[in-house]
Every structure is written in C-alpha cells, then in structure tokens.
Image: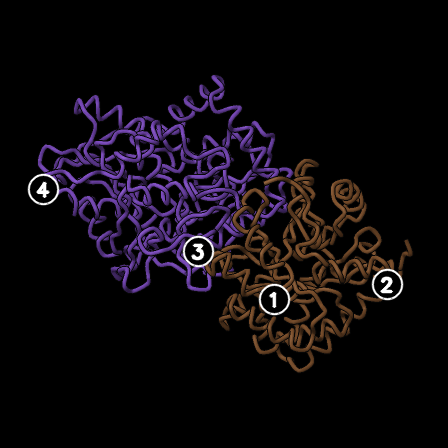
Chain colours: A purple, B brown
Amino acid sequence: MPRQPDPWTATINFVTRFQQRFPDDRGHFGPYGGRFVAETLIDPLQRLEAAYWRLKDDPQFRAELDRDLSLYVGRPSPLYPAERLSAKWGGARIFLKREDLNHTGAHKINNTVGQALLARALGKTRIIAETGAGQHGVASATVAARLGLKCVVYMGAEDVQRQSPNVYRMKLLGAEVIPVTAGTRTLKDALNEALRDWVTNVDDTFYIIGTVAGPHPYPMLVRDFNAVVGREARRQSLEMLGRLPDALVACVGGGSNAIGLFHPFLDDTGVAMYGVEAGGLGLPSGKHAASLSAGRPGVLHGNRTYVMSDDDGQILSTHSISAGLDYPGVGPEHAWLKDIGRVTYTTVTDEQALAAFHELARVEGIIPALESAHALAYAAELAPRLPRDAALVVNLSGRGDKDIFTIAKREGIELL
Amino acid sequence: MTAVAIQSPAGGGSRIDVRLRHLASQGRKALIPYITAGDPTPRMTVELLHALVAGGADLIELGVPFSDPMADGPVIQRACERALNQRTGLGRVLEMVTEFRRRDGDTPVVLMGYLNPVETMGMECFAERAHRAGVDGVLIVDWAVDELEPMVAPLRTHNIDRVLLLSPTSSESRVAEIAGHASGYLYYVSLKGVTGSDRLNVDSVAEKLQQVRRHSRLPVAVGFGVRDAATAHAVAAVADAVVVGSALVATVERHLGAPQQLAGALTAQLAELRSAIDSQRIIS
C-alpha cells in the first residue's frame, strides 16, 4: 500500500530543529500561546522569563537541578517492559515510563523542583500553586518545605472532596490548602484564584504553574522541566531496543506529562505520538474534558489555545472521573501540534480508563493514577493494531493511591 | 505598528473625547461608574444605566459577564455568576446598549470584560455590532498591548476607542508603549490586586500618574480600590477620572431582595460620589 504523504514531513522542511524553534520570542506556538493577562502581571512574567533565560544553561543551575532530580526525585525513572500486559492486549510490546515511581508519585515533581530553584533565584519567599488531582499541589508543597518557603495551594472545592488524601498530604507538608468555591469548583477555578493571589502578592510570591498552560513563559519552562521524561525514554529505548520506539502515548489534561514525553522526539519523524484526552461519559454527551478533540480556539488563563466554550465565549464546565484531566483548556503547544498534525489527539471514556486501571493492577501489579489510566486505555486499543515487533511507550505519569477512594466509592465499597 | 499616539479615531473626536475634554475645560473630574450587565437581571440593566446617569455619571463602564473573571474580586465574580445564570452573553449586552441609546445619545459607554467572548464573536463582527449599538470604547482586561494587533484595525474602522490598562508594575518604557496604543483614556489600576481591594495608596498613585503624563496627553482614569466618597475625593485630586465598580455592584447585591429600590439607591450613591469629587473643583 502506498504511504500517504505525511503532513509532518512537509512541515519539517520549514521547521527544522522544532525543539529549539518554539515558542517564538513572544511565546507563540503558531497562532497559540502568548501572554493574555492583566497588565499588573506583565512585569513579573518578563522578570521570570529573563531569569529563566539567564539560568537555563547556567552550569551551576543545571548541576543543582540534575542533582535534585537524581538524589531527591529519584531519577532516572525506569522504562519498564510490561510483558504480561503486552501479551494480554496483543500486538506491540508495551513499555511503561515509570513516572509513578518518582518522589511524591507523579511527573509533577520534575517541574516543581525546577521552578522552586527559579523562585529562590528571584528571591521570592512565598510559593502559590493551583492543583486539580492534588499531585501538583503535593509536589509544590514538597519543594516549598525543602527550601523553607511558605506555600499556599488553591484547589477546587469539588476536588478537595474527591482527592482528600492529597489534601492531607499537603497539610502534613506544611502548606495551606484553600478550597475554591467559585465557578465550577474545579481546576480552572483554582487557576483563576491563584492568578488573583499572584496579582495581589506579586512582590514576594512565585506562582508555580503545574501544567504547560498559562501565559508565556510558563508553557515553555514547564515543558522544559518535564522534558527530562522524554530524554530518558529516548536514551533508554536506544539502550534496550537499539532503536527508537514506534509510538508514544500519554494522557492530556493541561498536557505537561505528554509534552514532557513527546518533546525530545518531535524531530524523530518515525515516532508516532498520541495524546489521550478525557472523554468522560463520551463526546456526544457533552460531559467530557476533551478541549482538543471537541473544543475550539479561544483565550483562557493567559494563553490562546483550544478551549471548551459555548457560542457566547463562556468557558464550559467539564467532566472527567480524573480530577487531573478535568480542565477546559490545554497547553498551547499541544494546540499547535494538533493543527500541524504532528501529534494525534484522541479520547477514551471514564469506563475505558477504569477498565485499564484494573487491568494494570491485576496483570502487572501497578496501580496507576486515573489520569495515566487514560493513556493505558488508548494503548489497549492501539497495541493490537501494531505488529508484534513494534514498541509502544506509555507514560505512566502517576501512581493511583490517591484514587482508591474514588474507585471504591464508585464500586459501592466504603473505606473508613 | 508604530507607537504613534492615536488620540482620536474620528476627525471631530469620539464621544469619549468630547465628554472628557468638556469636563477638563471646566476643571472638573469625570465620574465613571461600573456595573455588570445582566445583574441583578438582564431586564433591569438599561434602567440602571439611566439611574447612574441621573446620579451624575459622566461615562459608564458596562461589564460583559465572563465565566472566568480572573482580575475581579469576589463581588464582581458573583455579579458575573448572577448574570450568566440568566444567560447574559455579549450579544445580549450589545442589545442593552442599543436600548440605552434610545434615550441617551450623549453618555459614552465603554464595554469592560475579557477577551474570549469577543474573540468568539469575531473581532470584525464585534466591532461592527458594537459601533451600531452605540458603544464608544472597549477595555479588555486580559488583552495586554503585546497581543493587541488583530484588534486595532477593526476598532479603528468602527470608531471605537481602545482603553488600555496601566498598573503599578508597568515600567516606564511599558507606560510609553501602552500610551502609544491607547485612545479615549488610560485606565490606571491603582493597586496590585483584584477589583474591590482595599489597599489604595493615593500618594503612590499620584507619583505614578506623573510618570504616565510624561508619555501621554490622554486623560487618566484611576480605578480598583475606590469604594466611597472619601477615596473618590482623594483620587479625584490626582486623576482626571474616578472609576467606581465593586462598591456599586455591592449595592446591587444588597438589593437582590428589593430590586424596586435598586435604581434609586444607585442614583443616590452616585450623587454622593459626584459631590465628593466636585468638592475639590480645580480651575486650571
């Protein structure tokens, strides 16, 4: 069968060295990204950007970051060949990038370790963060405790309910958790509230955004701090297989774990990439969080990207069983990667994610986060369609301990 | 795009220019009230706009409700929620302005809100419909000057002023850049914070306004943190215009159970602010 012309191959003629070209100097990924915030925040964003450019390649900063990632976070995380799962699903060999084994149990710590070093370099004494599933809140509280910084975490009131173990973890780490009761009481409202805090306390406060969204330079620097995931996976794949993998799969809410895995492979045209959004109760139901698959371009939280909004431009409430994916926007780089066809974005439903959650626990002895279970569920569809010698890397972005109460409740089991 | 100041979109000056120049010639300061469209109900908004004018408003900022008002404090957040619960979208807000214009052809109206509703309608379509409705200016909070470009031509074509924000954190070069892109008036955010904060420091406002005036001849309005006659009086001493928002929206909220008394209450509140501002009339 003749190969279809690949839109990516055409694009790459213009966009060589993608990794170094985006965003542009105003924070744009094609038509997306940018800096759409109230004027008060422009100056701190410019200072953050300047500090980042100054420190990014500074040998001392890099050495400290590398040391933290290795000795505190526990990197590199393994690339684990899931033999039994591969046999069960058939087709491609499945490898799991074990971000669940990081300190605090998810990829989120890669970014907070980096941003905390930036906060210290800028002389800030107070950290704020927003959180959905609570993983980023825990990762922020963790680094704040370690550096002796005050930490305030904003969390939607609904998420406080469904992720109570993480709320308690943050408190144990010395952070103040503020439930947000405005709007839909989820991640987007926590982000609004964190931005309001920042605009009020901009002199002493550093805002650690947890995903590749927000105003420039956040999508860039959160990506760069998470790209260690993809760099390791690339090296590990070459060591184990003698070649690159054929496909990468990661879940996408804001998109930080996905961009972290994808980014170092963007120039490898032979590597297919799949971003899996939360399909909730199914796209036709309207109860989902699939902004790339079912949203439209718009402006939210400081950047232009795909958002879930109605005909009046109001942001819609979203639904996902997974708090970490329950967000009506997505990182602007994903919007761009979708438009140019480099990454394929798709969805799986709550039910599919739950099935994959149970399957991984029973077959491989690993309890995944509900977010990561979305990536697994798509891998279950994709693997059988690929040949047996194909290699599929799934980002197991976090562990599922935080979700056991949600799962138990759904199954009618009462835990304490 | 060059940083040449566009003081007036039309030859004779916009409704905003005319109004603010007239006040300045009398040595008076402008009073600019803000309310959120659709709050407490869409049907009351036009009546409330007239009530504001009756109390002494020189220009009105009408809030376009948005689901994620990230620069607003709790008072205006709740107003947005009330308005959106009654489906007050941008199209409906434009209809309200059209209706207001049937009885008031003089008081300038500036729409204040966030970008996504405008982008969803489309820049060109919005500018054309806003002009037809009788809107004189727009102030879009999350539209920093860096991203302004796509909006400039449609707004200029339809003679709608671009009111831009300045803040305590704006550097001097940034003030110059923003001043070069604004028309109508400049809006100085008096404090680091959200709408309805209570940290106003008039001395630091006065200092910053001196810097602003080195870069622009546009009138400068000061808002965020003006909540009563005393703060309005203090701000009027240093600014060309005083913006009052959350304090009025709080009045709306207090009258949710007694809507028939709301218009009178707003008129009275405006009149008090008016006399506080006028009590220091400066003849220049």
**How much space separates mark 1 and mark 4, taking CA atoms?**
58 Å
Q: Position of residue A140 (x, y in %)?
A: 47, 38
When the figure is inspected, residue A24 is found, relative to residue B279, above or below; the finding is above
| Residue neighbourhood size for the residue with mark 3, other residues' Cα within 10 Å, grouped as few (<14), some (14–19), many (≥20) | many
Q: Amino acid at mark 2?
A: Asp
Q: Which residue is mark 1?
A: B36
Which of the numbered marks, if any, corresponds to residue A90?
Answer: 4
SS class, disc 2: helix
Q: Report the residue marked by disc 3.
A: A186
Task: Report the number of discs.
Answer: 4
The reply, left or right, for residue A222 in relation to residue B225 is left
Q: CA distance from mark 4 to mark 3?
A: 38 Å
- The residue shown at (8%, 35%) is A388
Relative placement, left or right, of A281 versus A143 is: left
Q: Determine the CA span between mark 3 and mark 1.
A: 24 Å
Q: Depth check: give the residue in front, A138 or A136.
A: A136
Q: CA distance from mark 3 to mark 2?
A: 46 Å
| Mark earlier in primary sequence (4, 3) | 4
Q: Amino acid at mark 1?
A: Thr
- Of discs 2 and 4, which sits in the foreground? 2
